[in-house]
Amino acid sequence: MKTVVTTKFVKNIVLFTFLALFTSPLLAQEEEEKKKFTFSGTVDAYYRANFNGLNKTVENTAGDDFAPAAPGTSFANDPGFALGMANLIASYEGTKVGFVADLVFGPRGEDAVFGSPIGSANIVNQLYVYWNVSESTTLTFGNFNTFLGYEVISPAANFNYSTSYMFSYGPFSHAGLKADFDLGNDWSAMLAVLNPTDFTDINPFGELSFGAQLGFSGQYLNFLYGKQGSNEFFNGTELVDTDVESLFQIDYTGGFDLSDKFYLGINATYQDTDGVGFYGAALYPQLTTSDNFAIGLRGEYFATMEGFGNAAGIGADADGDANVFAVTLTGNAKIGDLTIIPELRLDSASEEVFLNGDLEFNESLASFVLAAVYSF
């Protein structure tokens, strides 16, 4: 009886060892299959014309070029036929860890990474690694695009080709460490420790900013706080204290499917640095008429405080305040991986800031953009 038991035990050991040796490569292969390397990106170009503004560059008496009349927003502001950017994205997704390397080339890309010419060739839009610590927690380390706002840098991810004022003067990118949490029941949260805004290569000021996000079912409330400059500078002999106040920004981004074909996006933001800053709100109604065509409108009100409007390109009154209302009508026509984007835009500012063909300034500007964006 003992002999039989021993024999069965030995057989079980042999069988278990065989199965372990046989299945281990299969499990390793399955693990390997979960890892995924992808290469994607976009290429875009556009044509721009003003109906009541200057459509060329001219020189003043000092020999400096006047910029053509254009909205005081980022990208798509050059006259005639112009280039956007080539965006090349390599990513590697494993079961636990991965990375994203996002490079940009061309005028739009240069404008997007304006804050970090130090230490790089000025082509890095995003460069980060991540770790899925658990099913509900992900850590991201490196340079990533901002979590604030409705619009993004990539023209393929926006419905409108031109951008809003809120996007243009909010953050573009951050460098730091962030933790994303899935709280369950459609709730999410994020906490971040960051360099000053858009300084993604290095931190030249020795100051840190802090970010946070609370999300529920596609609606997000975002926060950013911290000093965006140094509190001291070296005058050649000693360190001199300066008075740099902390920036605070609160931002709501979201949207709702009002029907199978009609979507309404919403963005509202407020940014303040010791009384200097801006606030605004925008609606993005979008109607899908077929599998290959959609039409949408962006209506935005943007206001500035204490002279910030000069930096934003919308001027300032005697109190340093200004505002602008901009309406953009955009179509998206898809031909395979190519999207054709015709766009009509009207900007109406409280100050005379738009240059016309007679080199005089008006309060309003009407313009047309035709863009082509290829995604791969």
Image (tube, grey):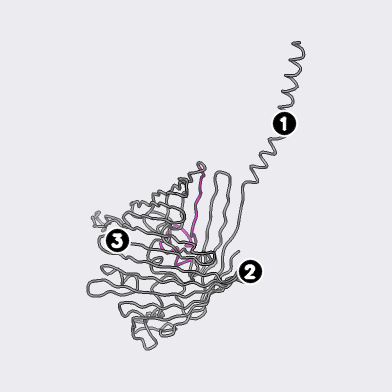
> What's the mark number on residue 336?
2
Relative to 230, say whether 258 is above or below: below
Q: Are marks 3 and 2 in contact (CB under 8 Å)?
A: no
Say whether residue 192 is left or right of residue 98.
left
Q: What is the spatial separation of the Cα atoms under label 1 and label 2, in whole angstroms?
A: 48 Å
Q: Which residues are magenta?
A: 109-132
> What's the mark number on residue 19?
1
Relative to 117, say whether 211 is above or below: above
Please state the horizontal and vertical placement of residue 35, each as a whole percent of the image: 61, 47
The amino acid type of the residue labelled 1 equals Leu
The amino acid type of the residue labelled 3 equals Asp
Instruction: Using a 10 Å C-alpha cutoff, classify the residue at mark 2 as few (fewer than 14 neighbours), some (14 to 19) or many (20 or more).
Output: few
Instruction: Using a 10 Å C-alpha cutoff, classify the residue at mark 1 as few (fewer than 14 neighbours), some (14 to 19) or many (20 or more).
Output: few
In what quadrant of the picture does the C terminus appear? Answer: bottom right
Q: Residue furthest front?
A: 259
| Residue for badge 3 | 272
- Residue at image position (33%, 54%) is 225
Relative to 331, say whether 228 is above or below: above
